[in-house]
């Protein structure tokens, strides 16, 4: 069973979090919600309150095969401002594990300096902050380049999650979940 770490900060985009969480869980992936604060409660951009499973500082990153960063402009700023988040992203990248981000969250990958040789995408309004730090910028809805997967927005979360599930658990598992939820 693959284990994926979600980095959660106040201001996260709820659709991006819930769609990716739900699809990965349906596919048999173990997801751990890591809050970047001492308080386990994390509040989404539109008021959804969740409880993190643990604080990031309490977790051993070696137990996980990848990391996911949801978007949401305030959430991404909070992630970007955390040295622990930047170091964690760099550790996952250096260990050649999955590094995934959606919407504005590729800004965190840019700040962590892990996309310089990769093709990525992001929410259109942050393109100018991402593009100078990557090899190539794409306007595709979901972009996978080796161990980095990026996507554009809440409206692409389902496609992103199914792609992530496919690389973790295989195409047959991803297609099974796709058919169960009547995804496009």
Image: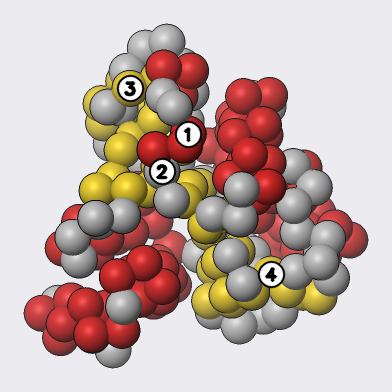
The first of marks 4 and 3 along the sequence is 3
Give the CA distance from mark 1 to mark 3: 12 Å
Q: Residue furthest left?
A: 180
Give the CA distance from mark 4 to mark 1: 24 Å
Mark 2 highlights which residue? Answer: 64
Give the CA distance from mark 3 to mark 2: 14 Å
Q: Are marks 2 and 1 in contact (CB under 8 Å)?
A: yes
Give the CA distance from mark 2 to mark 4: 22 Å
Inspect this view and state whether residue 138 appears.
yes
Label 4 residue SS: strand
Label 1 residue SS: helix
Q: Sort mark 4 into few (<14), some (14-19) or many (20+) by Cα contacts within 10 Å.
A: many
Mark 4 highlights which residue? Answer: 120
**Residue 80 image position (x, y, % from top left):** 67, 34
Q: Residue at x 75, y 69 (%)?
A: 118
In the rendered image, the quadrant that contains the C terminus is: bottom left
2 vs 4, front mark:
2
Mark 3 highlights which residue? Answer: 54
Position above or below: 3 against 58: below
The first of marks 2 and 4 along the sequence is 2
4 vs 3, front mark:
3
Inspect this view and state whether residue 108 appears.
no
Mark 1 highlights which residue? Answer: 61
Position above or below: 58 against 141: above
Q: Sort mark 2 into few (<14), some (14-19) or many (20+) by Cα contacts within 10 Å.
A: some
Rendered image: mark on residue 119: none
């Amino acid at each position: 069973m693959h284990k994926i770490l979600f980095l959660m900060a106040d201001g996260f985009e709820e659709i991006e979090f819930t769609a990716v969480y739900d699809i990965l869980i349906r596919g048999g992936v173990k997801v751990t919600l890591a809050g970047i604060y001492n308080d386990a409660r994390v509040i989404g951009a539109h008021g959804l309150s969740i409880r993190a499973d643990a604080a990031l500082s309490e977790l051993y990153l070696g137990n996980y095969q990848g990391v996911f960063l949801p978007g949401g402009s305030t959430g991404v700023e909070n992630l970007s401002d955390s040295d622990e988040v930047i170091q964690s992203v760099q550790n996952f990248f250096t260990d050649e594990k999955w590094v995934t981000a959606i919407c504005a969250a590729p800004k965190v990958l840019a700040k962590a300096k892990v996309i310089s040789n990769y093709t990525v995408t992001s929410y259109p309004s942050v393109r100018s902050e991402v593009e100078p730090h990557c090899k190539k910028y794409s306007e595709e809805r979901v972009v996978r380049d080796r161990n980095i997967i990026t996507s554009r927005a809440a409206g692409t979360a389902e496609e992103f999650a199914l792609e992530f599930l496919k690389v973790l658990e295989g195409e047959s598992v991803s297609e099974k979940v796709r058919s169960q939820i009547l995804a496009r």
